[in-house]
Each structure stands twice: as C-alpha cells, then as structure tokens.
Image (cartoon, helix red, strand yellow):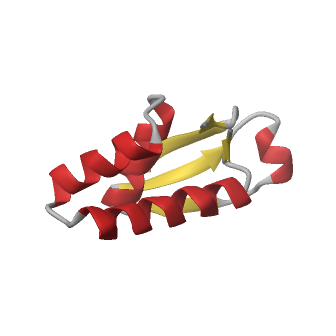
Amino acid sequence: MKIKDGFVVRDIMGQCVVVATGEASESFSGMIKLNDTGKDIWEGVAAGKSEEEIIDQIVEDYDVDKERAKDSVSKFIADMKDKGFIID
C-alpha cells in the first residue's frame, strides 16, 4: 500500500493536515486533520511500512495493547483507502 500521488501532509498553524495537490485537488478539495496517531500511521504508510510494522510502532510509541492498536490502525487505513488517499 502507498499514499496516492497528490496527497501530502502539511503543518498549518500547528495542526497536521492532509491536503490534495495537483490533479488530486480536482477530485478532493479541503483538508483532513490528523491527530498524532493519525500522523504516525500516515507517515508509516508513506515510508512503505506494512500494516503490521505500523501497528508495532504504535504499540511501542503509545504504550497501548496490540489488539487496540491493530483495531485503530486497521480502521484508519480502511477509511483512508475508502477516501482514495491510500492505494494497494
């Protein structure tokens, strides 16, 4: 899986957001705010990490149990796929 071309993370006034650029902005206008966990998941996908690697990183960084991290990461990634930000 990877981030679809044209979607980037930006810091706008201290808030992390996903914005569309170029051709992607023709089909998506607006911004998606990311909390710290969302940003970490997004960056993991952008870095080419597997879902399992991202889950392990979330467990380590946020001291949550693996099942909770797996549920959150899986839902976030599924939602981003549904919105067309992430492709397989």
Q: Residue at x 27, y 53 (%)?
A: 58
Q: Looking at the image, which is closer to me, 78 or 29?
A: 78
Q: Looking at the image, which is closer to me, 41 or 6?
A: 41
Residue 21: name its quadrant.
Answer: top right
The N terminus - image quarter: top right
Q: Is residue 42 left or right of residue 7?
A: left
The C terminus - image quarter: top right
From the top left corner, tell me how far across and down residue 14 is, in percent: 33, 55
How many marks the image carries: the answer is 0
- Res. 12 visible in picture: no
Q: Residue at x 49, y 54 (%)?
A: 17
Q: Residue at x 38, y 61 (%)?
A: 70
From the top left corner, tell me how far across and down residue 36 is, in percent: 31, 58
From the top left corner, tell me how far across and down residue 50 is, in percent: 46, 37
Q: Is residue 38 left or right of residue 28?
A: left
Residue 83: name its quadrant.
Answer: bottom right
Q: Looking at the image, which is closer to me, 58 or 39?
A: 58
- Res. 47 visible in picture: yes
| Vertical placement of residue 20 versus 37, above or below | above
Q: Looking at the image, which is closer to me, 61 or 18?
A: 61
Q: Is residue 15 left or right of residue 63?
A: right
From the top left corner, tell me how far across and down residue 55 is, in percent: 34, 51
Q: Residue at x 27, y 47 (%)?
A: 56
Q: Is residue 36 left or right of residue 76?
A: left
